[in-house]
Image (cartoon, rainbow, N blue to C red):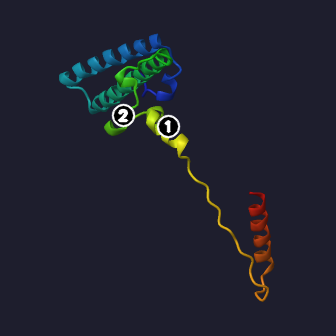
C-alpha cells in the first residue's frame, strides 16, 4: 500500500512512469473495492477515497503535460485547435482584431489627407502696468510670449 500521491513529485516524472503509476493505483483501487464488498474495515473505505484522488492527480498531470506539448507543436501554425484557443467571451472572440479595426477606407484616407486637423493658437495680450504680478505669474507670461514668438 502506497501513501498519498504528492502532485509536486509527479511533474518531474516521465509519461511512462506516470502511466505505470496510474495502472498500479487503478489495480489497487479495484482490489480495495472487492475487499469492501467482502466486508473490509472502515480504514479501507478512507483508502478508497485517497486512491481516487491520487488517480485524479496523476491524470491531471498527464493531461497538462499533453496539452503543453500540443501548445508547443501548434505554436507557429496558422490554426490552433479549438480547445487550445483562448476562451474569453463570445463577444470578444467575434470582435475585430486590432489590425482590422485600425484599417481605413480609401475615401477616409483621402478625406484626412486633404482636410487635416487645424491647429489654433490663442493670442495673449500683455496686462496693464497697474496690475502687480507674482513671480510665478511673470514667469508664466514670459514662457507664453516666448512660445508665441517662436511659432
Return the x and y of residue 6 as percentages of the image width and height. Answer: 47, 28
Task: Locate residue 109, reporting x and y percent.
Answer: 50, 37
The answer for how far apart the CA atoms under marks 1 and 2 are is 28 Å
Would you call the spot at circle 1 few (<14 residues within 10 Å), some (14-19), or many (20 or more)?
few
CB of mark 1 within 8 Å of CB of mark 2?
A: no
Which quadrant of the structure image shows residue 78?
A: top left
Q: Which is nearer the eye, 109 or 104? A: 109
Residue at image x 36%, y 13%? 23
Q: Can you say which quadrant of the picture contains the C terminus? A: bottom right
- Which label sits on residue 93? 2
Task: Give the number of marks.
Answer: 2
Q: Position of residue 43 (x, y in %)?
A: 31, 32
Check the image and report above or below for 130 versus 39: below
- Helix, strand or loop at label 2? It is helix
Q: Nearer the viewer, residue 4 or 98?
A: 98
Which label was assigned to residue 109?
1
- Of 144 and 68, which appears nearest the observer? 144
Which quadrant of the rendered structure holds the N terminus? top left
Mark 1, mark 2: which one is toward the viewer?
1
Amino acid at each position: 500500500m502506497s501513501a498519498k500521491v504528492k502532485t509536486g513529485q509527479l511533474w518531474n516524472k516521465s509519461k511512462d512512469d506516470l502511466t505505470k503509476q496510474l495502472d498500479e493505483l487503478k489495480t489497487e483501487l479495484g482490489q480495495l473495492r472487492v475487499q469492501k464488498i467482502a466486508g473490509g474495515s472502515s480504514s479501507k473505505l478512507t483508502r478508497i477515497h485517497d486512491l481516487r484522488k491520487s488517480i485524479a492527480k496523476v491524470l491531471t498531470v498527464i493531461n497538462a503535460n499533453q496539452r503543453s506539448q500540443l501548445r508547443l507543436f501548434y505554436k507557429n501554425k496558422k490554426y490552433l485547435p479549438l480547445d487550445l484557443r483562448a476562451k474569453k467571451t463570445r463577444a470578444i472572440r467575434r470582435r475585430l482584431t486590432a489590425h482590422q479595426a485600425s484599417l481605413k477606407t480609401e475615401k477616409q484616407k483621402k478625406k484626412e489627407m486633404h482636410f487635416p486637423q487645424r491647429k489654433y493658437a490663442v493670442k495673449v495680450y500683455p496686462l496693464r502696468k497697474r496690475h502687480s504680478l507674482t513671480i510665478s505669474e511673470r514667469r508664466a507670461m514670459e514662457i507664453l510670449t516666448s512660445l508665441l514668438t517662436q511659432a
